[in-house]
């Protein structure tokens, strides 16, 4: 794939957090409170959210496994849907609330409290607040898509240690209002964070496109439960201007400098815990998908042949295909949101008859093309792939365009485990099957939800119990409100 080797400016964080070496520092009170710099808080939150989405550690992010693109071959418990043993519910809860949202909200509040004199300064301040608000919306959507009902209206209040859990649909509707307002407040003729923004380097136009793509995703998640609200969110965002090419992708660029390098380098540089599942290998092989050469490697002992590992079972690493070593390079990028996803979401919207500029077929083709271009597939190979009857967008009476869109989403969202798993849950395709080795708590099904933190019953018992009852039980098999079918 295209490495996108642009330097990331973590010097800003170093300036904020590292000690000085000059003589004057000897006279500083090392125990004195240091006021956090709001820009640094946002930078830290961006990095932590990128870790949530991209880290493949079994201690947090098993979503590539739940989407059955990867399978654990050394310690297969995670492919058998063991969530409790590693406290996955708590790990993600703490990261998203404490390490991401708390810093974003603190950053927003501190910027809001600063004075700005002059038209330009006021516009820059407003842009900063709107950009943080867009990120807050995205993280809260992630929390709802993980757990269902979560603390929202009372969350992050330092005086309230036991916030109530709010209804997922209610949260979603409020998020829709918030992101629409935030996008409208962006002034693309002015600046924002500059190098403190580790995703777009402060480019406001890019944030507008990113925000609208997030709004489209938010709307499509509602498409089966509140189509009227969903349609308004999607059409409004499309008209406002979402991502239109891979140049608009939201990319987090790691460096080779610890601690800001690719988390998968640290976890897997000398390990081989995961292989590509036989389901995923066979899917790409059947379609002669050229991304196969970029996604994973041939099995070492199989003479250059791609071989998937049986899902949920141990396997010899030399006899199965492992993921492309590029994914664990020290400075490999983190893909937070891309044009391919935007296109597939618009294809789904167009297939429902919504006004999103082009036909479902066009958006669908754009999604595949964007994915392949992102990974470095030659244009001639893209054309050959799109011409296949099993790939081309179906128009015949009785065909199922929704399933075709969902299937290509599953392939294109490779290495974006959380969104791949989320798309599967909403669109119910491909038809994934739990392994015979799955834990009893899975009830013979693929998980459709992350369980709450194991600490919730003892730290916020009454509200936890109410939330669990409201969603239908704190189980991995409990469908979220938007997972209608």
Image: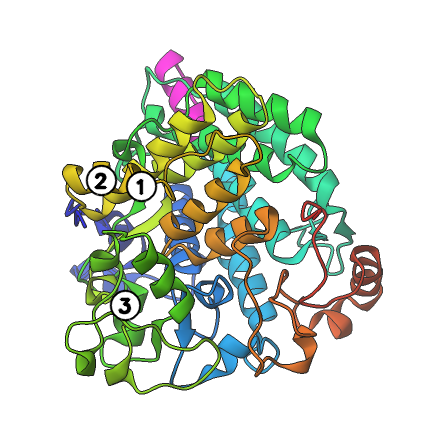
Residue, x 39% and y 70% (percent of image)?
278
List the residue tagged with mark 3. 323
Which label sits in the foreground, 2 or 3?
2
Residue, x 44% and y 63% (percent of image)?
64
Is 108 situated above or below 469? above
Q: Report x, y in % for residue 185.
A: 49, 20
Residues in magenta?
Answer: 116-128
Looking at the image, which is closer to me, 135 or 158?
A: 135
The part of the image, by quadrant, that contains residue 23 is bottom left
Position of 56 compared to 83: left or right?
A: left
List the residue tagged with mark 1. 388
Looking at the image, which is closer to me, 388 or 47?
A: 388
Residue, x 63% and y 60% (percent of image)?
448
Label 1, secondary structure: give it. Answer: loop
Label 3, secondary structure: give it. Answer: loop
Position of 88 compared to 309: left or right?
A: right
């Amino acid at each position: 794939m295209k490495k996108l080797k642009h330097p990331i400016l973590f010097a800003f964080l170093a300036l904020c957090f590292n000690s000085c070496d000059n003589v004057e520092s000897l006279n500083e009170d090392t125990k004195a409170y240091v006021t956090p710099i709001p820009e640094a808080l946002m930078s830290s939150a961006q990095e932590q959210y990128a870790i949530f989405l991209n880290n493949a550690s079994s201690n947090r992010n098993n979503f590539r496994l739940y989407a059955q693109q990867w399978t654990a071959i050394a310690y297969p418990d995670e492919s058998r849907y063991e969530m409790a043993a590693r406290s996955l519910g708590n790990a993600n809860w703490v990261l998203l609330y404490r390490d991401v949202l708390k810093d974003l909200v603190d950053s927003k509040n501190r910027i809001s409290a600063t004075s700005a004199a002059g038209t330009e300064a006021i516009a820059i301040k407003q842009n900063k607040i709107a950009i943080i608000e867009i990120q807050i919306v995205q993280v809260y959507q992630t929390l709802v898509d993980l757990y269902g009902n979560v603390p929202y209206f009372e969350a992050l209040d330092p005086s309230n240690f036991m916030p109530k859990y709010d209804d997922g649909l209610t949260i979603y509707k409020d998020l829709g209002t918030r992101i629409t307002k935030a996008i409208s407040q962006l002034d693309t003729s002015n600046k924002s964070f500059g190098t403190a923004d580790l995703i777009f380097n402060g480019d406001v136009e890019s944030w507008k496109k990113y925000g609208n793509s997030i709004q489209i995703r938010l709307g499509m998640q509602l498409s089966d439960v509140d189509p009227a609200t969903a349609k308004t969110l999607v059409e409004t965002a499309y008209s406002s201007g979402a991502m239109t090419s891979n140049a608009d992708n939201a990319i987090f660029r790691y460096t080779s400098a610890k601690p800001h390098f690719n988390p998968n380098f640290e976890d897997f540089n000398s390990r081989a815990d995961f292989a590509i599942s036989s389901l995923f290998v066979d899917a790409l092989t059947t379609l002669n998908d050229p991304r196969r050469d970029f996604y994973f490697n041939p099995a070492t002992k199989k003479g250059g042949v791609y071989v998937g590992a049986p899902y949920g079972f141990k396997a010899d690493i030399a006899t199965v295909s492992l993921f492309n070593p590029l994914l664990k390079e020290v400075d490999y990028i983190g893909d937070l949101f891309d044009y391919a996803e935007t296109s597939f979401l618009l294809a789904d919207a167009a297939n429902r008859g919504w006004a999103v500029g082009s036909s479902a077929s066009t958006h669908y083709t754009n999604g595949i093309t964007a994915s392949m271009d992102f990974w470095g597939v030659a244009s001639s190979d893209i054309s050959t792939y799109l011409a296949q009857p099993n790939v081309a967008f179906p128009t015949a009476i009785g065909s199922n365009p929704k399933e075709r869109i969902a299937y290509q989403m599953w392939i294109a969202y490779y290495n974006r485990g959380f969104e791949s798993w989320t798309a599967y849950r909403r669109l119910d395709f491909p038809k994934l099957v739990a392994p015979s080795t799955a834990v009893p708590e899975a009830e013979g099904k693929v998980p459709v939800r992350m369980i709450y933190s194991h600490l919730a019953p003892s730290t916020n018992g009454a509200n936890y119990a109410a939330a669990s009852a409201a969603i239908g039980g704190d189980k991995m098999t409990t469908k979220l409100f938007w997972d209608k079918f």
